[in-house]
Amino acid sequence: MFDKVRVLEELLEAMIAENETITVRAVCRRSDGVFKHATDITRNTQRQATVNAAVARQETIRTAVERSSKKSRSELERLVATKNDEIAQLQADKELLIASHRAMILAVAEMGGFATWRKFYEGYQEVIDRLEKMRAIPSGEVVDFPPRGVT
């Protein structure tokens, strides 16, 4: 036996790629007998939801294509360049925030307060995990130096 939801997803992807209007009947026609009647899809909530999501996705794609086709090539190139600049700026901002965050954590750790900082985020393990994934939490150990003049 085969997974009908998987077959349905493949049919919908193909219809989106070929810009074929998605309806339940169109899916049935294209299914080579997997879905004999429209009710084979509409009675099953998971299948119906899959079709509805694909219809919404197709409408989004068509809207984007329609909007972009009204713009000239130079306008689209300018828009892409602007978006690329925005992405680069956001990435630079993120790197700056990570470096700043790392420096603040090091400053707190040097003063012996890393345990307190970690306790502050105790209920936010997801935040700590994201910070570690971003490499925003410095690794290493703090070494206490003897006071000056003591050997």
Image (cartoon, rainbow, N blue to C red):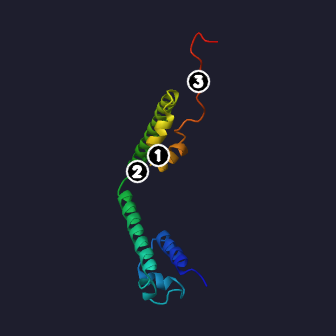
Q: Nearer the viewer, mark 2 or mark 3?
A: 3
Q: Compute the Cα span from label 2 to label 1.
A: 47 Å
Residue assigned mark 2 = 76
Under tag 2, what secondary structure? Answer: helix
Residue at left offset 39%, top offset 69%:
56
Q: Nearer the viewer, mark 2 or mark 1?
A: 1
Q: Which numbered disc flags the more N-terminal residue, 3 or 1?
A: 1
Q: Please, what is the three-letter code of the amino acid marked with disc 3? A: Asp
The answer to whether 34 is drawn above or below residue 85 in the figure is below
Residue at left offset 48%, top offset 30%:
108
Q: Quick one: 32 or 122, which is closer to the camera?
A: 122
Tell me the crowding category of disc 2: few under 14, some 14 to 19, or many 20 or more residues within 10 angstroms, Cα based: some
Q: Which numbered disc flags the more N-terminal residue, 2 or 3?
A: 2
Under tag 3, what secondary structure? Answer: loop
Quadrant housing the C terminus: top right
The answer to whether 146 is drawn above or below residue 134 in the figure is above
Q: Are marks 2 and 3 in contact (CB under 8 Å)?
A: no
Q: Please, what is the three-letter code of the amino acid marked with disc 2? A: Leu
Q: Position of residue 88 (x, y in %)?
A: 46, 40
Residue assigned mark 3 = 144
Quadrant housing the N terminus: bottom right
Q: Compute the Cα span from label 3 to label 1.
A: 26 Å
Q: Quick one: 144 or 50, which is closer to the camera?
A: 144
* Mark number displayed over residue 122: 1
Task: Say whether residue 139 is visible.
Answer: yes
